[in-house]
Image (cartoon, rainbow, N blue to C red):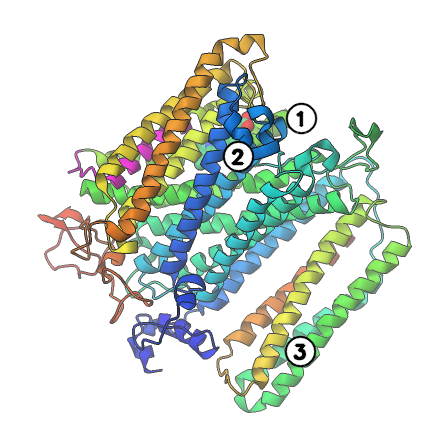
């Protein structure tokens, strides 16, 4: 890559990578989406006919799972930075993706518990909010799992040798973000009552 | 991180990237269809925008025909439109679909995607001195999401029950229940899905624009040396990235209400068609309005800011004078950007909004007049005693300023809640936003096209056609929309199929015919522009120099037809701001020229 010395920003090598920066902007945008939804929840909860519902207790486990997955994704980043530990890197990515899938499954079981208790789209506005908001969050986790899988297969591919850790770092940032977002949502639903 | 490394990161991951250093073979597909070159993507946005502008304009001609001549029939319409114009008369359902689609298409597809998509893509890398966007791949995706969204929106015209017809704001309950109107059936689903894809496109574009402006500027180009165009595109992208997701949440809730029986917006209202009440309970339609206008108001500035930025640049260049009050211009863009998030409820004064709360929104709304006035003042002082070259681009930029003043003033009327009780949902509002947003931003867009066409295609547009285009359009725009203020003050409600039934509006029959006729003429004149655009691509006067307008900015240092990567050699370094015109006895000094020892300060 001898073009690098052609670079106009050569002296700014310490600056944040544009792709990473783009991820931060995307996160701001996701924050706005959930801010919109949770403020809609607040507005509605102050109106007549509102009934609170208990959040399923399964969510404690899913919270644990997603927090652990944040740790493993961070370990994957560390392993990638120390090049020789590529097998560890693959292992941590696999565990993280697995925990992500487990999280989504737990959310799903939490939902079906609620549903069997009679909290359906028709019967409860607060329930509907819960389904929509937590469902959208789960979609974001699924997106994260997909991104992890792409990084995972790249790590195995012979054709492309990815030495730069930018890709996995971006995925890790995103992963921590959905983790934090989930903690925010749990606190929100517990405290707003 | 360097520009080169970004391009190469892609080469390394298999998305073949090409630029000056090693010319690979580019197939038709990678060059023209799935291109990742920001210049080609910009042209794709522009051409799609032009197609949509023609369609959207045609819709307005059709519904103006109904408004101007409510009692006449036009048999030819039935031949073309079939059941939508039975007996040669635009049918009510079709009329509402036309109005809705006209608004949606012009606001989102033409003045958001067509405007930001075109010029942010073209100018951000070129004026920042970057080889391409931060992520050329996401940039390409942004266009294709827009394209798919366009196709879905377009196809909704061809379904049995017709396109969405609940207004461009798509308020529930009307938009939520198919029994309320034909357009609220499948057409509304198309609308929602299309808008969701559009939002994805806008977000992908926006985060690229932000990342590129902040991280990929060439050496020496500090933020305060940026041309005002870039500042405007930057704030536009910030507005979009922070407000579009809120509309997405609003749309998702609406989809749930439509199909899954939730009651976010719906309550037990009575449906006359089925003679039953809805099973829903406790929903609030006002909630939708909050979510919608939290995007909706920033959206109007998303449309306006790019036009402001380009007008600043074009006015300064063609007055051969530095822009007056550069920092004030940046500061007012910033102020507008912040305030845009704090005024959404001025669209909701008559929804039963608490008048005490309303008072705060009145105050914040009127505050926007301050940065707006600063900008107007600075444009006028830049023009003042300038050595003006009246190119078509310059005329359109001046026209933009004129329209922005006229429309901004009526905004101040509307921003007072006490006056708005009377004026809301009348033609006064229609006049206000068409002048200040619709026509003004179209003028900004035309100015941009006339000015940067040489950079896009290496040829000039025909100027004579340009002058005709300008004069007919500006006269037409005022003739169409000025009278609407009077209609609105007299109480003529907007969105109605036929207002000639009201006795107190009888006096406007002739005026309505006049407006419709002018609208037809203006529409035809736009076709002249379209002709000019495509004709000049092949037959226009060729550029002989790199820098036809004597501009200071970086895009004019690239070759006449730049390849992917923009500069064949090294990217130029920047030493000064973009507005050194008529300085120290020189006509202009390019940004790339180092500051001389003797040079005066600006
Ligand atoms: C001094 C500045 C402005 C003020 C105080 C202002 C105020 C208002 C108010 C209060 C309304 C609501 C009227 C109603 O529905 O009853 C309104 C409508 C509107 N304004 Fe402005 N405005 C200003 C500038 C602008 C600008 C710069 C744009 C666009 C670039 C714009 C675009 C619109 C649009 C699109 C609507 C109508 C939306 C609809 O109901 O369909 N306004 N304006
Ligand atoms: Cu507004």
Label 1 or label 2, whichever comes before in sequence order = 2
Residue under numbered circle 2: B80
> Callout 2: residue from which chain?
B
Of helix, strand and loop, which one carries label 2? helix
Q: How many marks?
A: 3
Image location (x, y in percent) of residue B261: 79, 44
Image check: A98 left or right of B358?
right
The label on residue B352 is 1
Whether residue A170 appears in this view of the structure is: yes
Do the residues indicated by labels 2 and 3 lie within the same chain of the protein? no
Asked whether the beta carbons under mark 1 and mark 3 sit within 8 Å of each other, the answer is no
Camera-nearest residue between B372 and B64: B64
Q: Residues within 10 Å of mark 2 (few under 14, many from 20)?
A: few
- Which residue is at the far right? A117
SS at circle 3: helix
| Residue B563 location (% of width, % of height) | 30, 66
Tell me how far mark 1 sits from mark 3, CA to CA: 51 Å
Front-most of residues B69 and A155: B69
Q: Give the side of residue B307 with respect to residue B322, left or right.
A: right
Q: Rate crowding at label 1 as few (under 14), some (14 to 19) or many (20 or more) other CA atoms within 10 Å.
A: few
Chain bearing tag 3 is A
Q: In the figure, B571 relative to B528: above or below?
A: below
Residue name at image x 28 percent, y 55 percent = B457
Q: Would you name the residue on which mark 3 appears? A: A72
C-alpha separation, residue under disc 1 versus residue under disc 2: 44 Å
Whether disc 3's CB lies below 8 Å from ligand 2 is answered no
Which quadrant of the figure contains the N terminus of chain A?
bottom left
The magenta region covers B385-407
């Amino acid at each position: 890559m001898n073009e690098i010395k052609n670079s106009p920003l050569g002296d700014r090598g310490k600056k944040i990578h544009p792709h990473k920066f783009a991820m931060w902007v995307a996160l701001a945008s996701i924050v706005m989406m959930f801010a919109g939804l949770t403020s809609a929840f607040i507005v509605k909860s102050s109106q007549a006919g509102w009934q609170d519902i208990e959040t399923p207790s399964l969510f404690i486990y899913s919270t644990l799972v997603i927090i652990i997955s944040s740790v493993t994704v961070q370990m994957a980043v560390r392993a990638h930075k120390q090049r020789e530990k590529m097998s560890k890197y693959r292992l941590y990515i696999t565990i993280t993706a697995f925990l992500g899938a487990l999280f989504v499954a737990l959310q799903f079981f939490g939902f079906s518990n609620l549903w069997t208790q009679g909290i359906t789209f028709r019967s409860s506005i607060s329930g509907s909010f819960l389904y929509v908001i937590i469902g959208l969050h789960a979609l974001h986790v699924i997106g994260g799992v997909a991104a992890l899988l792409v990084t995972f297969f790249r790590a195995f591919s012979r054709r492309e040798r990815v030495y730069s850790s930018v890709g996995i770092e971006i995925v890790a940032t995103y992963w921590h973000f959905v983790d934090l977002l989930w903690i925010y949502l749990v606190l929100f639903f517990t405290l707003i009552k | 991180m360097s520009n080169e490394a970004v391009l190469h990161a892609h080469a390394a991951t298999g998305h073949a990237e090409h630029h000056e250093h090693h010319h690979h073979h580019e197939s038709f597909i990678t060059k023209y269809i799935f291109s990742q070159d920001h210049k080609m993507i910009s042209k794709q946005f522009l051409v799609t925008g032009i197609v949509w502008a023609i369609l959207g304009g045609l819709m307005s001609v059709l519904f103006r025909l109904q408004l101007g001549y409510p009692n006449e029939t036009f048999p030819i319409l039935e031949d073309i439109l079939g059941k939508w114009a039975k007996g040669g008369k635009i049918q009510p359902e079709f009329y509402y679909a036309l109005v809705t689609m006209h608004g949606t298409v012009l606001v989102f597809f033409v003045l958001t995607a067509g405007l930001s998509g075109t010029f942010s893509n073209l100018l951000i890398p070129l004026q920042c001195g970057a080889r391409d966007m931060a992520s050329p791949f996401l940039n390409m995706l942004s266009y294709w999401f827009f394209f798919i969204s366009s196709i879905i929106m377009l196809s909704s015209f061809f379904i049995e029950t017709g396109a969405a017809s609940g207004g461009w704001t798509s308020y529930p309950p009307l938009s939520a229940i198919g029994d309320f109107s034909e357009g609220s059936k499948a057409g509304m689903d198309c609308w929602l899905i299309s808008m969701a894809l559009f939002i994805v496109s806008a977000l992908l574009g926006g985060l690229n624009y932000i990342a590129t402006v902040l991280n990929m500027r060439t050496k020496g180009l500090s933020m305060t040396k940026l041309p005002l165009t870039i500042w405007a595109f930057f704030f536009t992208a910030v507005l979009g990235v922070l407000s579009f997701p809120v509309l997405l949440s609003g749309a998702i809730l609406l989809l749930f209400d439509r199909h899954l029986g939730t009651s976010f917006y719906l309550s037990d209202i009575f449906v006359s068609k089925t003679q039953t009440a809805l099973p829903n309970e406790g929903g609030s339609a006002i909630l939708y309005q909050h979510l919608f206008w939290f995007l909706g108001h920033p959206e109007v500035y998303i449309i306006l800011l790019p036009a402001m930025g380009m007008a600043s640049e074009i006015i300064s260049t063609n007055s051969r004078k530095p822009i007056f009050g550069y920092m004030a211009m940046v500061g007012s863009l910033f102020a507008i950007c912040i305030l845009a998030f704090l005024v959404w409820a001025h669209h909701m004064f008559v929804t039963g909004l608490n008048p005490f709360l309303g008072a705060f929104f009145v105050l914040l709304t009127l505050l926007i007049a301050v940065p707006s006035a600063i900008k107007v003042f600075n444009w006028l002082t830049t023009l003042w005693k300038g050595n003006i070259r009246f190119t078509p681009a310059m005329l359109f930029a001046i026209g933009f300023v004129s329209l922005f003043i006229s429309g901004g003033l009526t905004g101040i009327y509307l921003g007072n809640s006490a006056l708005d009780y009377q004026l809301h949902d009348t033609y006064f509002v229609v006049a206000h936003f068409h002048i200040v947003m619709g026509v003004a931003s179209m003028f900004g867009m035309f100015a941009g096209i006339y000015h940067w066409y040489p950079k896009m295609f290496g040829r000039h547009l025909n100027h004579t056609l340009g002058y005709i285009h300008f004069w007919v359009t500006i006269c037409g725009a005022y003739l169409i929309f000025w009278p609407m203020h009077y209609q609105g003050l007299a109480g003529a409600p907007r969105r109605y199929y036929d207002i000639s039934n009201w006795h107190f509006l009888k006096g406007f029959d002739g005026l309505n015919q006049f407006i419709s006729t002018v609208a037809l003429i203006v529409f035809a004149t736009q076709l002249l522009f379209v002709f000019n655009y495509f004709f000049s691509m092949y037959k226009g006067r060729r550029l002989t120099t790199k820098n036809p307008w004597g501009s200071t900015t970086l895009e004019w240092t690239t070759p006449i037809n730049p390849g992917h990567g923009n500069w064949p050699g090294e990217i130029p370094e920047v030493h000064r701001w973009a507005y050194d015109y008529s300085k120290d006895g020189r006509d202009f000094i390019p940004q790339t020229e180092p500051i001389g020892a003797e040079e005066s300060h600006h």
